[in-house]
Amino acid sequence: MKVAKYVAREPDANGFIHYPETEHAVWNTLITRQLKVIEGRACQEYMDGIEQLGLPRDRIPQLGEINKVLQATTGWSVARVPALIPFQTFFELLASQQFPVATFIRTPEELDYLQEPDIFHEIFGHCPLLTNPWFAEFTHTYGKLGLKATKEERVYLARLYWMTIEFGLLDTPQGRRIYGGGILSSPKETVYALSGEPEHQPFDPLECMRTPYRIDILQPLYFVLPELKRLFDLAHEDIMALVHQAMQMGLHAPKFPPKAA
């Protein structure tokens, strides 16, 4: 059995999580570097959220600090979880307006890329936009749908999540910007996603659901929203009808090589 490399830290009796100085130093390195990289590349709604959260630079924030801001803006909160959680738990949390956050941080050896979502990815990548009502509404709706979906339907929903919440771009009057948390927490992908190298397609939820992806490579294709409000509008459309349509039409051929065995 594979032993998990990362173990989430437990809070003390007062709900306070103690991190060693070495881990605060990793947070400081990650946030200082990434704030520079996202300048002029992240969408304004995300930057507004960063400002509202007021993330500390010198230490890993406590979940209670994040909750105070999220509760006041959109009624959301974060929930402490171990590393990877089952789909069912994930949907249950989102459906109750709680965003899962694993309370461990990557090691200095894995600064640039980590397959498991750590506290930096979840808080820096996703929490700023959870202060935005449009984004929060879409995430909440997504959780409620996922909770009722069958195993097969969930796979199609997962692709929609990947192409929006994790790896979405949007067009703005100032130019193309990033809103996906998977991009915004990665220095390499932040630069790459807006370059001429990958393919960019206008956002189409059906196409998102039919597009295979790999989690361990730079994405070959990004879907671009016309504006962030499109996610709010999508939350009020019949997403499950689109899932069934995507299931009937089947998947596109992957735009990446198969994973080496």
Image (cartoon, grey):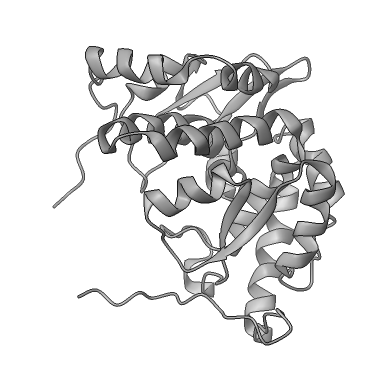
Q: Is residue 24 visible?
A: yes
Q: Is residue 167 visible?
A: no
Q: Quadrant of residue 176?
A: top right
Asked whether 146 or 258 is in front, the reply is: 146
In percent of width and height, residue 160 lies at 44, 29
Instruction: Spot the residue most to the left.
Output: 261
Seen in the image, is 213 located left or right of residue 233? left
Residue at point 51% right, 59% down? 112
Q: Quadrant of residue 217?
A: top left
In percent of width and height, residue 240 lies at 41, 20
Asked whether 146 or 250 is in front, the reply is: 146
In percent of width and height, residue 249 lies at 24, 12
Residue at point 37% right, 55% down? 86
In percent of width and height, residue 20 lies at 65, 86
Seen in the image, is 18 located left or right of residue 85? right
The vertical placement of 104 against 47, above or below, is below
Seen in the image, is 112 located left or right of residue 1? right
Asked whether 56 or 137 is in front, the reply is: 137
How many labels, in total?
0
Seen in the image, is 70 located left or right of residue 234? right
Q: Quadrant of residue 227?
A: top right
Instruction: Spot the residue most to the front.
Output: 148
Q: Quadrant of the N terminus?
A: bottom left
Residue at point 82% right, 58% down? 68
Residue at point 40% right, 35% down? 148
